[in-house]
Amino acid sequence: MKRVSLVLAGLLVPATLVAQLPDPSTRALAMGDAYGSLARGYEAVAWNPAMLAALDRPGLSIGLPHLNFEFGSNVYGFSDFRKYANSYLSTADKQTLLDKIAPPDSTLGLRTIVGIAPFGLSIGPVGFAIGTAGEMDLGVGKDAVQLALFGNASRTGPGQYFTARGSNGRGWAATTAALSYAMPFPIPLGHLSVGVTGKYTIGNFLGSAGDLGTQIGVNPAFSATVAGQAIYTSYGKHCGSVSITGSGTCGAKAGSGFAVDLGGTLQLLHDNITLSAVLVNAVGSMSWSADRLVYERTLRQTTQDATGKVKTDTSTITLTTPTAIAADPQAKALRDSLLAHASFARLARLGVALKNGPLTVGGTLQIRLASGLDQQYSQVVSGGAEYRVLGVLPLRVGAAWNLAGAFTLSGGLGLQLFGVNLDFAIANISGSVNPGVRLGTGIGLIF
């Protein structure tokens, strides 16, 4: 049966690595995110504010729309999608896909991450950027995957049933505006710059869901129990429009917070060697409005009697106020778990860049100091290179390793002509931890 678009494509897409402020640099993605010592102009707001006062800073740069998109899973990689897309799945193909989810109680994890940076600007040592980032993760129990691949014919014996054990979901979205400033400090050793970025974040959405005992059986008669719970940011069903800064049910402001990034860079030999250090979210906080959260718990039971008649009973509990949620132990536990991990990660980055004519090489070590909504690796080592052909056609490659099973290979190219920078990038994430694909494209003006 030709069901890969229903299974693989549906699994790899929704179930943005993404940060609080989405990366406005497609060049960084192509170079393996080894970019703390290379960011220029508006790119520096997200990567290292100190680069706004670097020797080779542009006088003016304008970031036009940039888009980064990642999709993948903890089991299936892009190679699986390419192999089985638009093809009929044999029984052996289905079994191969199912066997990748092991042991029997394992969960298939799926993720979609999006970062959109519509505008950025730098004038000398001052930079500004705005962007929206979001992530959705879905966990699907192995039983549910087997049911999707094989149907219910694989378990028809008495007492055999399918469950949704391990199935869950989470998602968030936020919009951040950031303002950066940098100062140079020429010293005998070289050119020292320090910078600071202040960020204001509006939380647009926050949600979590989980299974509460779903079970489906077919022998001796069909019976199904579908049970689950969810808590999420509510929006009015009949809103004509959504206010960007509004906090009501027709407003996009479901949470708010601030943060400060600190950066420094030291350039040696007239910027041929650049060293950098950045602390992302050195200070900051993020809170979400409990008034915007709605909790739902559903139990639906379907049974078939001896005559073949099917009966369905449904009960739903919906709680719409903080008081009502707090009074329900199950709802309160889910809400508290959601809000306990609803800030953004704190990171430290050390970087180096070497330039020699048309060749630029960079390296970065990133360490997560505190976890958050944006699921950053504990540590990442990355490196990248760019070679400019005829000065206008940059070719880029990069690699990153999280020291725990995830390895990323990336590449891309650009066109830089009369100050216009048009860039494309792709990265393949392989290994035992969350394989997937990242894509990026963007345009900017750098003078």
Image: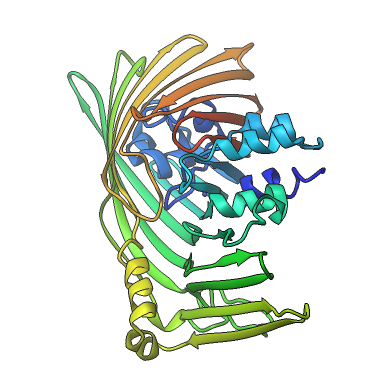
- Looking at the image, residue 16 lies above or below residue 366: below
| Residue 158 place in picture, x, y as percent | 61, 61
| Residue 49 place in picture, x, y as percent | 35, 41
Q: Quadrant of residue 79?
A: top right
Q: Residue at x 48, y 67 (%)?
A: 209
One can see residue 119 in this view: no
Q: How many marks?
A: 0
111 on left or right of 433? right
Question: Which quadrant: the C terminus?
Answer: top right
Q: Identify the residue at the far top of this view.
A: 357
One can see residue 278 in this view: yes
Q: Nearer the viewer, residue 354 or 247?
A: 247
Q: Nearer the viewer, residue 308 or 78?
A: 308
| Residue 277 place in picture, x, y as percent | 26, 33
Q: Residue at x 61, y 76 (%)?
A: 242
154 on left or right of 63? right
Q: Nearer the viewer, residue 367 or 283?
A: 367
Q: Quadrant of residue 273?
A: top left
| Residue 39 place in picture, x, y as percent | 43, 32
Q: How is the image coloured?
A: rainbow
Q: Identify the residue at the far left of this view.
A: 188
Q: Nearer the viewer, residue 19 or 97?
A: 97
Q: Residue at x 36, y 63 (%)?
A: 342
281 on left or right of 164? left
385 on left or right of 236? left
- Looking at the image, residue 133 lies above or below residue 206: above
